[in-house]
Amino acid sequence: MLHAFAVALTLLTRLPVRLRRTPDDRSQGLAVAMYPLVGLVLGALMWLLAAGLDLLAAPSLLSAILLVTLWVAITGALHLDGLADSADAWLGAHGDRERALRIMKDPACGPAGVVSLLLVLLLKTAAITALLDAAAPLWWLLAAPVLGRGACAALFLCLPYVRDQGLGATAAGNLRRRLTWGMVIGTGLVVCVPVGLAGIVALACAALCLGVICRGLRRWLGGFTGDTAGATLELVETATLVALALTVTAQVGLP
């Protein structure tokens, strides 16, 4: 389990994790179940930064930009790259599945990819700024990364991996389904339910977003790829943060 967690960290982050042995097929499948725990690590690191910025009385917008910068740095913009490739493929393929898969392999970033990156980063920054202005407890820094990576793991449970080769194909072929479902659902409940309404909203938003994405991917590609998994993660994180910002600010504004 510890080796699988380390494998998941190397796959989803740029943290300096040293593996004691080369991941085999079994550990790659088991690593998918560890994805939500990687979200906990990421959230904890951002929580530390947010707490330090609060002690320094940093402006909320500056704090939000620094948090998003750390978010991108830890992940190496890996999932953002998947989002950009997926956006380019969706716009450029015109419904042609094979062409979409070819576009995702192209390292160049087109207009749709650039716009999608800008929108996601702006939405995240705006939502974090609103949450900091509302003085909301920092649990949401755990919720968004956990739910985003839980959604990424859930793709392996809900859809087939459409490419024949690659790490995703190996992981999908060696998936521990019961354990993965347990980790996805369990971490989401543990992180979100204790905080009440806002946590329920976060869970519902993540589940709804995942459902819409799964339905769209099934119709578009017949499954998912590594790029669309990264896009799913980013979209669920962003939607969750926006929903939380709207919920928390509405609660603050109530008499």
Image (cartoon, helix red, strand yellow):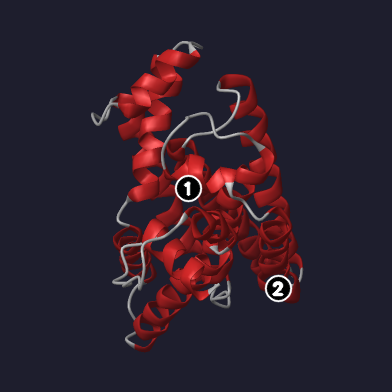
Residue at (55% x, 69% y) in the render = 37
Query: Can residue 113 be seen?
Result: yes
Mark 2 or mark 1, earlier in chain = 2
- Asked whether 93 or 237 is in front, the reply is 93
In the picture, measured across the screen, residue 171 lies left or right of residue 186, that is left
Query: Can residue 129 be seen?
Result: no
Q: Which image quarter holds the C terminus?
A: bottom right
- Asked whether 63 or 41 is in front, the reply is 41
- Asked whether 170 or 140 is in front, the reply is 170
Are there few (<14), some (14-19), or many (20+) residues within 10 Å of tag 1? many
The kind of residue on which mark 2 rests is Val
Residue at (38% x, 16% y) in the render = 92
Residue at (73% x, 67% y) in the render = 189
| Element type at mark 2 | helix
- Determine which of the numbered discs, if any, sits on residue 234 in the image: 1
What is the distance, in whole Å, between disc 2 and disc 1 at their CAs?
21 Å
Are there few (<14), some (14-19), or many (20+) residues within 10 Å of tag 2? few
Q: Which residue is mark 2?
A: 190
Q: Is residue 180 above or below residue 48?
A: above
